Each structure stands twice: as C-alpha cells, then as structure tokens.
Amino acid sequence: MADQPSIFGDEFNGGIPVRRRELLSLFLKIYIWLGMSVSCLFSLLLSITLVMLLMWPSEDVRSSGWLPVIAASIFLMIAIITLFLMTFLVWREVKWAIKFNGIVAGCWLLFSASCFAIYGLSLLLLFIPFLVFLPYWIFLFRIQRKWEQ
C-alpha cells in the first residue's frame, strides 16, 4: 500500500522550537548536576552543624553570643540557595536562568573585589568560587541567544 500524503504542508513541523535542555553540552550537564549535588550536601552539613551547636555549644559561642553564628548561618544558607538556583533553573529550562547566572556572577565578582580592596590578600580565597564557576558561565553565555528565543 502506498502512503497517503499528509494533509499538512512540509513546513508545518518546521517551526517547532528546540528544547533548551538540548542546547546544553555534556560539560554543562555535569556542572549542573554537580552544582545541585554540592548545594544539597552543603545544606545538609550546615544543618547538622547548627544542630550540633544548639545541642552542645562551644565555649566560643557561649562567650561571644549567638549573633555571629546566626549571621554566618544566614550568609551560608543564602550562598547555598543561590548555588542551587543557578543550576536548577538552567536544568528546568527557565527562560531567564542565564540572566540570573549573569547577575550572580556580577554580584560575586563585585563582592569579591570589594572585599579584596578593603582587606587585601587575606580574602583572596573569595575569588575561588568565581573561578570555579567561570567555565560554566562562559558556556552558558555562548548559548544565551538561542536559549532566550
């Protein structure tokens, strides 16, 4: 039997957009999964540490009070949530995920540079997370135009 011709024209399926996840290279997919895994691991470690501090407070905590512990915990939780969102939004194919990553990169660079300018070489370690994510951001910005279509 001969195939019947389709009632649709040849260009009917031509306008189907490419899934954003198909734009991701293997390198980016590995970075995304590592980022989500590391952020979950860090949140678990932070939670365990806070529970241990609440149950068995150290002498430093008793003498200096809980304010430094609370402030450091809030800062770390914001960093962990940001790390998770940087990768999760890209994996979920959110249209503005690459712009969010650009804002995070800019904020982290500004924060690191201002700390470096104020405190000198002692806070040079703040540039390490920026350098770790630099290849991830470069690969993301390469596909940004196709991603946002």
Image (spheres, rainbow, N blue to C red):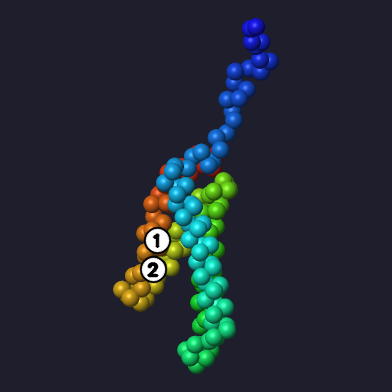
Q: Tell which of 33 and 24 is nearer to you.
A: 33
Visible in this render: residue 16? yes
Instruction: Using the image, tell me which numbered label, if any, was put on residue 130.
Output: 1
What is the quadrant of residue 44 in the picture? Answer: bottom right
Query: Residue 76 in the image: x percent, y percent?
Result: 51, 71
- Residue drawn at x 58%, y 48% as measured from the top left: 92
How many labels were placed on the picture?
2
User: What is the crowding at mark 1: few (fewer than 14 residues within 10 Å), some, or many (at least 20)?
Assistant: some
- The single residue placed furthest to the bottom in the displayed view is 63
Query: Residue 107 in the image: x percent, y percent?
Result: 46, 63
Query: Residue 29 in the image: x percent, y percent?
Result: 47, 47
Whether residue 47 is situated above or below residue 106 in the rendered picture: below
- Residue drawn at x 56%, y 72% as measured from the top left: 47
Q: Is residue 11 left or right of residue 125?
A: right
Q: At label 1, which amino acid type do we have?
A: Phe
Q: Quadrant of the N terminus?
A: top right
Whether residue 11 is situated above or below residue 139 in the rendered picture: above
- The single residue placed furthest to the top in the displayed view is 1
- Residue drawn at x 50%, y 66% as measured from the top left: 42
- Spatial CA distance of label 2 from label 1 is 8 Å
- Residue drawn at x 48%, y 52% as measured from the top left: 32
Tell me the SS state at disc 1.
helix
What is the quadrant of residue 110 in the picture? Answer: bottom left
- The single residue placed furthest to the left in the displayed view is 121
Q: Tell which of 91 and 140 is nearer to you.
A: 91
Tell me the SS state at disc 2.
helix
Whether residue 6 is situated above or below residue 116 in the rendered picture: above
Q: Is residue 24 left or right of residue 128?
A: right
Q: Tell which of 97 and 6 is nearer to you.
A: 6
Label 2 close to label 1 by CB (< 8 Å): yes
Instruction: Using the image, tell me which numbered label, if any, was put on residue 126.
Output: 2
